[in-house]
Amino acid sequence: MRNFYSIKKQVNIFRSGVLLFAIAPLFSLNINAQCPPGDIDLTTQAEVNQFIIDYPNCTQITGRLFIGLTPGSLSNITDLSPLNNLTSVGRLTVQYTSSLTNLNGLSNLTNIGGAVHIRNNDALTNLDGLSTVTGTVAGYIYVAYNPQLQNLNGLSSVTQITQHIDISFNNSLTNISGLQNINSVIAGLTIQSNPALTVCNLPNFCTYLTNPVGTHPRNIINNAGDCISEQSVVAACNAPATGCLQSSLPQWPATAFTPSCTGTAEVIAADAWTGEYSKVQLTAGQEYTFSSSVATDFITISNEDGTTAYMFGTSSVTGTATTNETVRFYLHLDSLCNSGDNVDRSRIVQCNGNSSVSEMDTDKLSYYPNPVTDVLNITNDKIITDVSVVNIIGKTVMSKTVNSTATQIDMTLLPAGNYFIKTNLDGTVKTIKVLKQ
């Protein structure tokens, strides 16, 4: 942009006579150039809007595309749609914006040659606008200080980077599964101070952490759940694929517990031990959170016979019942299924009772195809505010904001298996089960 505005200044100086005529061809040549050379800085919404006017045929920027401002002030940029012709940029920086909620204007971008730098964007909730970016990012991925950012699904088609990953200080971030297809992290892995992030044991990260710290530096601290530290992530990586279904002690208490679902935590047993289990009666459509008073305990929820694990994790797990059934609630000392310390702890369940079957059945929710191989279509007679995809162990692997009566979920990159689709219908949650082939 500096080159263009420099030419404008020259034209204003030589506005008369032969001099204007002499430079007019040069001015016209640059105005009609496909893309300006070098780095492009867009600091205001007006400059974003002007870009498509000045360069209507620009698709490939060889230098850096910089959107936003430098530290100390916030840009007023809210809409990137004037950039939707772009298919390739050398590097991408989006930072210090106050009202930019998404990157959807970059939805035709397929290649980022260098670093991806997303930081200090006060209203940014997702990176879905980058979902068409594929292959290698020849640089680092840095996503930090975005207080409303919820997931990194927009990076799910990136398969390789040449430097490091740094995901830090994103207060609302709950899901980083969008990074699971990156098959190399060369210069380092940092995941720190994301207080809502509980799951970091992505298969590629688990592989990375098996290497020596000297050759594969890492810094995983101050997150939550299984992501609270590097040790917790490693433990989650080594957790058995079927949870912990061993019980060295009998059921306690002897009868099944039926939660009242008042929205408060209910103690199933205050004198629970590791290596034993309780039975809990669930209601279809209701979301339950199972936890222990000992934050390091490993929890497994299974079917009534204890032959199939539905979900498992450290400290607490959350899931939605798909049928009326009784489940087993196991506690163990760790993900290696150790038990036997015989120290009293509380086995706890919480549910709010707002999502009964009768309430959900009044909504005309339809979805197809099922089984699904790529795109799942969902429609409803009421507004669908948001949708999330949960795997069989209770982990959210994908989420998106909808605010419409119809949406599509691209499940192409998800492994085959059963998934729960949670739809928020203006405050009422309805869960459906689909098979991904």
Image: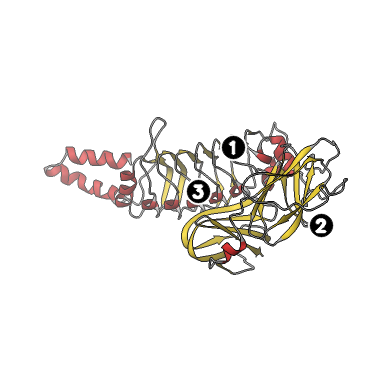
Between the C-alphas of marks 3 and 2, the distance is: 39 Å
Asked whether 243 or 427 is in front, the reply is 427
Q: Amino acid at mark 2?
A: Thr
For disc 1, the marked residue is 195
Label 1 secondary element: loop
Which of label 1 and label 3 is nearer to you? 1
What quarter of the picture does the N terminus occupy?
top left
Between the C-alphas of marks 2 and 1, the distance is: 34 Å
Which of label 3 and label 2 is nearer to you? 2
In the visual, does 8 lie left or right of 235?
left
Q: Tell me where residue 156 appears, x and y as whole percent.
A: 57, 51
Tell me how many marks there are.
Answer: 3
Q: Tell me where residue 144 appears, x and y as whole percent.
A: 52, 37
Q: Could you tell me if the residues under marks 1 and 3 are in contact, i.e. CB atoms within 8 Å?
A: no
- Where residue 437 sits, quadrant-wise, is bottom right
Q: Amino acid at mark 1?
A: Pro
For disc 3, the marked residue is 127
Q: Earlier in the sequence, mark 3 or mark 2?
A: 3
* Residue under the image location 59 percent in, 64 percent down: 358
- Is residue 210 visible to the viewer in this orientation of the structure? no
- Is residue 29 visible to the viewer in this orientation of the structure? yes
Q: Return the mark for residue 307.
A: 2
